Image (cartoon, rainbow, N blue to C red):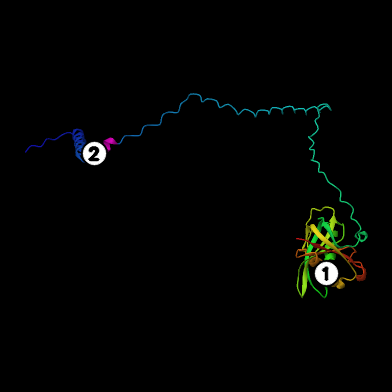
Amino acid sequence: MMFLILPARALARRLVLAFAVMLALLPGAGFLHAQTAPESAPPQSTAPQPTVPEAAPPATPAPDAAPTPDAAPLDEDDMVAPPVIDPKSVDTQPLAPADDPLTRPDGFGDPAELKPVPVMMKQAKSGWDDAFASIVATLKEIDAEMARLKLTPHGAPFILYTGTDDAGFEFEAMVPFAGATTEKPGNGIVFSASPAGRALRFTHRGPYDAMDPTYEQIANLLDAKDLEAQDIYIEEYRSDPRTTAPDDLVIDIWVPLK
């Protein structure tokens, strides 16, 4: 057997070549070939950089616009007066002065016409024993409310009987008045009107408790003349019942006819 002896340098080159062939045949060898050295960063440019202009100073604000001068005052010839509303006139008639009831002549069955007048009215009831005191007390309640409303009494008061029985009676007390108010009365008092229509007038003089004979005479007269009266009786106090002594009372009894 013969041995070929190669020089050391040639042997080294073959070993390197054989090692390279083995690496190429191994799996994943391409990975080594795929790895490439990173590209070196590009050299910095030596071109001059653009100069950044300095910030401009803030603009000076424009001066405010000159104020508009006020309008020139109007001349007297240019001034116009506001419109005037002319309220519609209202025709009124003053109330006739109340006649003095005491100057009226007495009557007994005299036909007459009741004229309605504005009154303040309150309904009430009473027993026969304190009948006159109840009437006077009710009239004074109306007086107080009339004074509060600044109204003026205007004529003789009326008492209208709306129902009677053995125990007592129901009535409406009325006080005529003059004046005007925007308020409503209180204490059960209302604005109303006095009775109106055809009636017979009878006069009673003396105490209230002594009126039974007068009413009997009225009933006799109606029967004699075959007259049919309504179911109400009206007393008009010609003398003030608040201040007149009972014996001096003068009362006109009005009997409305059907």
Q: CA distance from mark 2 to mark 1?
A: 152 Å
Q: Per the image, is 162 magenta?
A: no
Q: Identify the mark nearer the N-term, 2 or 1.
A: 2
Local SS, label 1: helix
Q: For mark 2, what is the residue? A: 29
Q: Residue at point 24% right, 39% down?
A: 29
How would you rate the neighbour count of disc 1 (Cα within 10 Å): few for under 14, some for 14-19, many for 20 or more? some
Occupied quadrant, residue 174: bottom right
Local SS, label 2: helix
Mark drawn on residue 215: 1
* Whole-percent x, y for residue 184 in the image: 78, 57
Q: Quadrant of the C terminus?
A: bottom right
Main SS of the magenta part reads helix
Residue 200 visible? The answer is yes
* Whole-percent x, y for residue 155 in the image: 87, 58
Mark drawn on residue 96: none
Tell me which amino acid carries mark 2. Answer: Ala
How would you rate the neighbour count of disc 2 (Cα within 10 Å): few for under 14, some for 14-19, many for 20 or more? few
Q: Quadrant of the N terminus?
A: top left
User: Nearer the viewer's eye, disc 2 or disc 1?
Assistant: 1
Above or below 46: residue 106? below
Tell me which amino acid carries mark 1. Answer: Tyr
Task: Tell me the magenta residue range.
Answer: 29-34
* Whole-percent x, y for residue 60 in the image: 68, 28
Kindly give the residue lying farthest to the left in the view shown.
Answer: 1
| Residue situated in front as seen by the camera: 218 or 91 | 218
Q: Per the image, is 33 magenta?
A: yes
Occupied quadrant, residue 117: bottom right
Q: Residue at point 27% right, 38% down?
A: 32
Occupied quadrant, residue 51: top right
| Residue situated in front as seen by the camera: 146 or 193 | 193
Above or below 40: residue 199? below
